[in-house]
Amino acid sequence: MKNMTRRFIKLISEDPWRDRESAYLNGSTSIVDLEMRMREIDSGRFRNRL
């Protein structure tokens, strides 16, 4: 039971979207590109839509 609880907590605490967003932002080539990418992320590009 402890093992299942630990795995569940680890699963919840990890944020794969944040990693993808960070990698996407780090790939920007200029300040204009960075601002465009930030707007895309704010609009929900990497989030699941329900």
Image: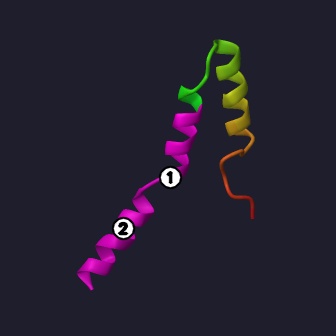
From the viewer's side, name the closer residue of 49 and 26: 26
Q: Quadrant of the C terminus?
A: bottom right
Determine whether label 1 and label 2 are within 8 Å by CB: no
Q: Residue at coordinates 40% horizontally, 58% vertically from top-left?
A: 13
Image: magenta residue range: 1-24
Q: Report the residue that reaches farthest toward the bottom.
A: 1
Q: Position of residue 10 (x, y in %)?
A: 36, 64
Q: Residue at coordinates 64% horizontally, 13% vertically from top-left?
A: 31
In the rendered image, residue 10 lying in the magenta stretch gets the answer yes
The amino acid type of the residue labelled 1 equals Pro
- Residue 40 versus residue 44 in the image, above or below: above
Q: Dot 1: what SS?
A: helix
User: Label 2 crowding class (10 Å Cα cut-off): few <14, some 14-19, many 20+?
Assistant: few
The amino acid type of the residue labelled 2 equals Ile
Q: Which residue is mark 1?
A: 16
Q: Residue at coordinates 27% horizontally, 86% vertically from top-left?
A: 1
